[in-house]
Image: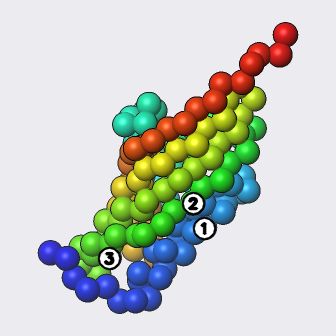
């Protein structure tokens, strides 16, 4: 059953996601991974990726994929459904820009996330990325 959230909880979840974007784009990997639960699930299969289980594995995977990339992530219009006082399902409209040596990518879609309240505050327990539009520009190889 969806309950009316306390505004402080709604705002705290929004701040976690704001930290997610800023810390990811500025490559602050140690702080970024702390936004997730230890047993988090990261699913990018609908966007051409894979499923990664666990915070350490997920953070390593993302770090390896994006360490040399320039990125900009933006999220908008959170839709939150609270499941009691300590859990919420949130859908964020998203846009990302990823610039790598081989290609530039601009994507639009949604993050589907489960947040849980922990002793450290709200954390992301699962994330599924879906994309509606992906614009990829492949760069010519430098021979």
Q: Which residue is mark 3?
A: 86
Can you give x and y, in whole percent of width and height, for residue 93 in the image?
43, 59
Using a 10 Å C-alpha cutoff, classify the residue at mark 2 as few (fewer than 14 neighbours), some (14 to 19) or many (20 or more): some
What is the secondary structure assignment of the residue under circle 2?
Answer: strand
Q: Residue at x 75, y 38 (%)?
A: 68
Q: Between marks 3 and 2, how big is the CA–CA gap?
A: 25 Å
Viewer-closest of 109 and 118: 109
- Which image quadrant for residue 85? bottom left
Nearer the viewer's eye, disc 3 or disc 2?
Answer: 2
Q: CA distance from mark 3 to mark 1?
A: 20 Å
Q: Residue at x 48, y 48 (%)?
A: 108
Q: Is residue 118 left or right of residue 73?
A: left
For disc 1, the marked residue is 19
Instruction: Check whether the beta carbons of the residues at disc 2 and disc 1 lie within 8 A of each other.
Output: no
Q: Nearer the viewer, residue 52 or 79?
A: 79
Q: Nearer the viewer, mark 3 or mark 1?
A: 1
Secondary structure at numbered mark 3: loop
Up the image or down, 108 lies above or below 86; here it is above
**Of callouts 3 and 2, the N-terminal one:** 2
- Camera-side residue of 42 and 78: 78
Label for residue 74? 2
Report, in whole angstroms, how far the alpha carbon at label 2 lies from the one at label 1: 11 Å
In the image, taking residue 2 as reference, residue 14 lies left or right, namely: right
Relative to 77, 63 lies left or right: right
Q: Position of residue 84 (x, y in %)?
A: 24, 78
Measuring from the top left, give residue 86's x and y in whole percent. 32, 76
């Amino acid at each position: 059953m969806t309950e009316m959230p306390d505004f402080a909880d709604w705002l705290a979840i929004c701040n976690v996601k704001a930290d997610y974007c800023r810390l990811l784009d500025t490559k602050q990997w140690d702080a970024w991974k702390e936004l997730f639960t230890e047993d988090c699930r990261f699913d990018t299969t609908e966007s051409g990726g894979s499923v990664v289980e666990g915070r350490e594995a997920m953070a390593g995977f993302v770090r390896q994929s994006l360490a040399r990339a320039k990125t900009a992530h933006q999220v908008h219009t959170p839709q939150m459904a609270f499941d009691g006082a300590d859990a919420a399902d949130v859908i964020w409209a998203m846009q990302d820009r990823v610039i790598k040596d081989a290609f530039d990518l601009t994507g639009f879609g949604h993050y589907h996330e489960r947040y849980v309240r922990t002793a450290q505050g709200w954390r992301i327990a699962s994330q599924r990325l879906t994309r509606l539009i992906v614009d990829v520009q492949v760069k010519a190889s430098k021979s």
